[in-house]
Amino acid sequence: MAKQSVKENNLMQLGYIFLFSRIFVNFIYNPMARLLQQNNILSKAITKDDIAFYASIFGILFLFLIFPFKEKFFGKTNIKNIKIWPLIFASIFGGALYLYFYNGALGKLGVGKASVTYYVYPVFLYIVGSILIDKDIKKAFNPKILIGIATCLFGVFCTYYEQIMKPTTTDVLGYVFIISSAICMIIFSLIVKKYKVPTYWFLLVGQTISIFIPFIKGITNHEIFKPTSINVYVTIIMLLFGIFANCLREFFRIKSVEYLPISKISTWNYFSPIMAGLSGVVFLGEKMTIYDYLGYVFVIGGNVIANYKKKK
C-alpha cells in the first residue's frame, strides 16, 4: 500500500511539472501569436489560418524526425489497442479546433483579455468532470461551486466592461473564439480522463487536421485558402511554434491531464491568466486598466473558492 502511494505521489509530482511547463510555454507563445497577427513582422499580417497551416507543417516534420525515438519519449503503444474514435475526437477538439479558436481570440482580443476569459473554463471543467467522471451531481452543484462560477463570470464582466459598453464586431468575434476554445478544452480533458489517448498519435493526428482546417473553412466560404508568403524570420518563428507550441506544449497538456485529478488541474490553472497577462504587458506593451486588474482578481478568486477544501 505504501509503495502504491509513493508511486501515485511521484506521478502527481510529474503531473505538476508538466502543468507548469505548459504554462511557461504559453507565457512565450501567447504574445508571439498576437504579434504575428498585429502586422509587426511582415508588411502583411499573419492570420490564424496561416499560423495553423505553417506551424502544423513544422510540427508534423518534427514528429516524423523523432518517430524512431517515440517509445523513449512517449512510451510503448500497441497500435492495435488504440481506440480510434477517442483519438480522433481528442485530436479535433484538443488539438486542431482549440489552437484555431485560441489563436483567433489572441488576434481579436489581445493576450490579457483572451486569457482571463479562457481561464474561466477550469471551474466549468470541474462541474462537468464531477458529473461525467466522478458521477457526483452534489459535488458539481454545491453552493461553493456556484459562488465560484458567479465570481469568475463577474471577473470576466469587469475585464470587458469598457468593450461591453461599446462593443465592436471584432470584440464579439473574439468572444466567440475564446468561448469556443474553452469548450474544446473541456471536451478534450474529459476524453483524455476517460480514455487512454496515445500522446504521439494525438499530436500527429491533431497537427494533420490543423493543416486542413483553413482549406475546409475556405471551401465553406467559397474561397481557396492561399497561405501568406513568409520571410525567414517568420519561418523560424513558425518552426518554433510547431515544435514548442504545437508539440511540446500539447505533450505537457495531455500528460498533466493524464497524471493529475481534474480538481487539481482546475485549482492550479488560475495561475495561467496571471502569466498570460504579464506576457502581454512585458512583450507587447499591452496596457492594463483597473477593470483588467479587477477581472484577474475575481477570476482567480472564483477558481480558488470553487476548489478550496478545508484541511482535515
Image (tube, rainbow, N blue to C red):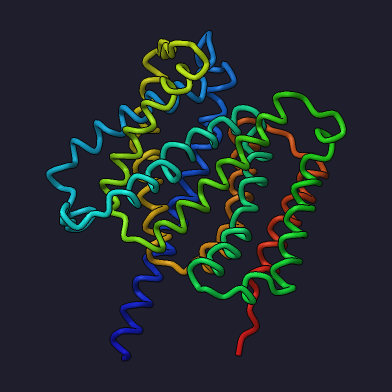
Left or right: 104 with respect to 50?
right
Figure check: 229 above or below 81: above
Quadrant occupied by the N terminus: bottom left
Residue 150, position as x, y percentages in the image: 77, 59
Residue 166, position as x, y percentages in the image: 85, 29
Left or right: 30 with respect to 284?
left
Left or right: 150 with respect to 268?
right
Figure check: 58 above or below 19: above
Left or right: 281 with respect to 104?
right
Question: Can residue 237 be spotted in the picture?
Answer: no
Judge by depth and name the residue closer to the eye, 36 or 207. 207
Residue 298, position as x, y percentages in the image: 76, 57
Judge by depth and name the residue closer to the eye, 262 or 16. 262
Quadrant occupied by the C terminus: bottom right
Corner quadrant of residue 60: top left
Q: Residue furthest right?
A: 165
Q: How many labels does the image show?
A: 0
Figure check: 257 above or below 220: below
